Image (cartoon, rainbow, N blue to C red):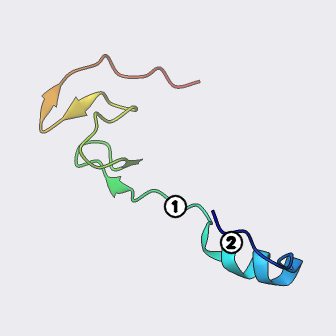
């Protein structure tokens, strides 16, 4: 296997890693309670998906 002859500088390494950041999740509005939720998932607040009730509604504190 080939090995590098010289060590990579910190600037070069950090420049290469600059695109490793995490992406924010895409959120959509629930049509029933109008809160943000992940698309194609059951709403954690009201428990509905595609107009049907799948989970009991979460209790508000």
The residue located at (68%, 78%) in the rendering is 16
Mark 2 neighbour density, 10 Å: few (under 14) some (14–19) many (20 or more):
few
To which residue does mark 1 refer? 24
- Left or right, residue 25 beside residue 19: left
Quadrant containing the C terminus is: top right
Q: Residue 60 at what x, y percent from top left? A: 52, 25
Closer to us: 28 or 57? 28
Closer to us: 45 or 22? 22
Mark 1 neighbour density, 10 Å: few (under 14) some (14–19) many (20 or more):
few
To which residue does mark 2 refer? 17
Q: Outermost residue toward the top?
A: 56
Reply above or below: 30 against 28: above
Could you say which quadrant of the image residue 8 lies in? bottom right
Distance CA(mark 1)–CA(mark 2): 18 Å
Q: Residue 35 at what x, y percent from top left? A: 39, 48
Reply above or below: 42 against 9: above
Q: Residue 41 at what x, y percent from top left? A: 28, 38
Among numbered discs 1 and 2, the one appearing first in the sequence: 2
- Left or right, residue 12 beside residue 22: right
**Which numbered disc, 1 or 2, marks the residue closer to the eye?**
2
The residue located at (23%, 31%) in the rendering is 48
Q: Residue 44 at what x, y percent from top left? A: 39, 31
């Amino acid at each position: 296997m080939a090995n590098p002859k010289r060590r990579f500088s910190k600037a070069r390494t950090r420049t290469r890693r600059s695109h490793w950041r995490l992406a924010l999740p895409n959120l959509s509005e629930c049509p029933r309670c109008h809160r943000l939720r992940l698309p194609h998932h059951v709403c954690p607040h009201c428990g509905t998906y595609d107009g049907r009730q799948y989970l009991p509604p979460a209790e508000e504190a």
